[in-house]
Amino acid sequence: MELLWEMAQLLVSLALILVSLLACVVIFAVDARKHNNAHVDASVIFEDPNSLKQVIETYPLGETEDFPQFI
């Protein structure tokens, strides 16, 4: 009977370890998705309401690379 109890404790311990590891992986994946800002580098595209064609946004002052860096 004691062997059965020790095996049950071992099984519960392994299950708790696996659940905690899975929780860590899920939390890490959610945090990585939350702080993913790869979409910021994409150019902004608008849609012309008259022709329904995509129009890329133009910057009135030019790209940021054209300006001198003050830092």
Image (cartoon, rainbow, N blue to C red):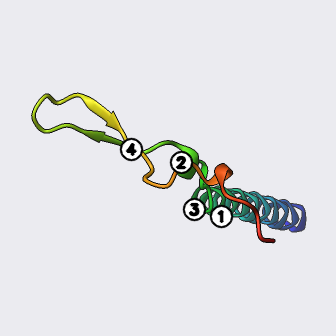
Q: Bin the neighbour count of mark 3 within 10 Å (Cα to Cα): few under 14, some 14-19, many 20 and up.
A: few
Quadrant in which residue 57 is drawn:
top left
Q: Which dot marks residue 57?
A: 4
Q: What is the crowding at mark 2: few (fewer than 14 residues within 10 Å), some, or many (at least 20)?
A: few
Q: How many angstroms separate mark 1 from mark 2 (CA)?
A: 21 Å
Marks 4/1: CA–CA distance: 36 Å
Disc number for residue 34: 3
What amino acid is found at the position of numbered circle 1 in the picture? Ile
Mark on residue 27? 1
Question: Which is more N-terminal, label 4 or label 2?
Answer: 2
- What kind of element bears circle 1? helix
In 3D space, how far apart are the residues under numbered discs 2 and 4 (Cα atoms)?
Answer: 15 Å
Query: Looking at the image, which is closer to me, 71 or 21?
Result: 71
> In this rendering, which labeled residue sits more in front, label 3 or label 2?
2
Q: Looking at the image, tell me whether mark 3 or mark 1 is earlier in sequence order.
A: 1
Which residue is found at the position 83% from the left and 61% from the top? 4
* Left or right relative to 4: residue 16: left
Callout 2: helix, strand or loop? helix
Q: Secondary structure at mark 3?
A: helix
Residue 41 at x, y percent in the picture: 58, 47
Figure label count: 4
Alpha carbon of mark 3 to alpha carbon of mark 1: how far? Answer: 10 Å
Q: Residue at x 17, y 30 (%)?
A: 52
**Residue 14 locus on image (x, y percent):** 81, 59
Q: Earlier in the sequence, mark 3 or mark 4?
A: 3
Looking at the rendered structure, the kind of residue marked 2 is: His
